[in-house]
Image (cartoon, grey):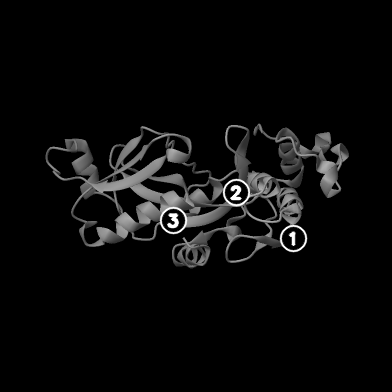
Amino acid sequence: MTNVHNQFLVGDEADAALSEEGGSTKGAKFSSFKSGTTYAVKLIGLKDYFQFYSYGIFNQVDSFCAENPSKKTAKGFPVDNLTPWDKAFRYYKDLSDDWTDAHSQEAQKYKPKSRFAMAFFDLTSGEVIAVDLSAKQHAAVKSAIEKYAKKKDKIAFELSKTGESTGTVVSLAPVLDMDEDITEQQRANFEKAPTEIDLTPFFSAPYIADEKEQIEALVKAGFDISLIGLSAGNATNDASDGGNNYNF
């Protein structure tokens, strides 16, 4: 796995990119955040997050970041140094007459998606955690953080995910009663929380796929790679590559 942290936008940089869109241990991973999950957390900073672009198709191809990311516009449109998935996106987008036709809908499958890693201090484990959020989910949590910013050192919060598929909602709500609504251990962890969060360990959390893996993922997604000038030989890996444990 390659840690290409230079493709991640942190804090204010991520805010700038989101505005344009309209909207120290290595190997740290995202915490599981399935629907029905709730974490009791403490807010440490107001901008403990970074932005990244990932590819993937829900329930078909697991999400990943490109080892050699493309250059993108402020709105996330790939314009240079295109990845195989960018090329698939551009192939269908160039056939599209508007954003509602079939070609445009197909293009959206392969478009790089803006994601955000948001970090919190988990009061149950007493450790810093990070969760992977969509741009829409990030915006909702960020709005709540800004609303309760002055209370972040006084009260805990519940970070929750509810709903399914496109109806999934992520929320951050204040704990109303610090004596009754959290445990004694959680209150103790609240008091010993760090004063700042180092995001760099989580730069390795998004999976980084090399070009061979990206091409294999396109094939798995059902895309005809010959349409973008590729063949099965492009995805052939010799034994010296060492392989990996990631399954598309």
At numbered mark 3, what does the secondary structure look like: helix, strand or loop?
A: strand
Amino acid carrying label 2: it is Ser
Q: Disc 3 or disc 1, which is closer to the eye?
A: 1
Which element carries disc 2, helix, strand or loop?
Answer: strand
Instruction: Please name the residue that numbered disc 1 is placed on.
Output: 81
- At horizontal 52% and vertical 62% (from top left) the residue drawn is 21
Q: CA distance from mark 3 to mark 1?
A: 26 Å
Looking at the picture, which amino acid does disc 1 mark? Asn
Left or right position of 63 against 181: right
Disc 3 and disc 2 in contact, CB within 8 angstroms: no
Q: Is residue 68 left or right of residue 13?
A: right
Asked whether the residues under the numbered discs 1 and 2 touch, taking CB atoms below 8 Å apart as contact, a structural biologist would say no
Q: Secondary structure at mark 1?
A: loop
Mark pair 3, 2: CA separation: 16 Å
Viewer-nearest residue: 44 or 170: 170
Which circle's residue, 1 or 2, is located before the other in the chain?
A: 2
Q: Which residue is mark 3?
A: 49
Q: Residue 74 appears at what percent x and percent y?
A: 58, 66
- Residue at point 18% right, 54% down? 154
Q: Determine the image quadrant of residue 175.
A: top left
Pinpoint residue 219: horizontal percent, then vertical percent: 76, 36
- The kind of residue on which mark 3 rests is Tyr
Q: Is residue 101 above or below residue 13?
A: above
Q: Give the x, y percent position of residue 7.
A: 60, 59
Q: Quadrant of the C terminus?
A: top right
Of pointers 3 and 1, the one earlier in the residue sequence: 3
Mark 3 or mark 2, which is nearer to you?
Answer: 2
Cβ atoms under marks 3 and 1 closer than 8 Å: no
Mark nearer the N terminus (3 vs 2)? 3
- Disc assigned to residue 54: 2
Label 1 to label 2: alpha-carbon separation: 15 Å
Q: Is residue 40 left or right of residue 83?
A: left
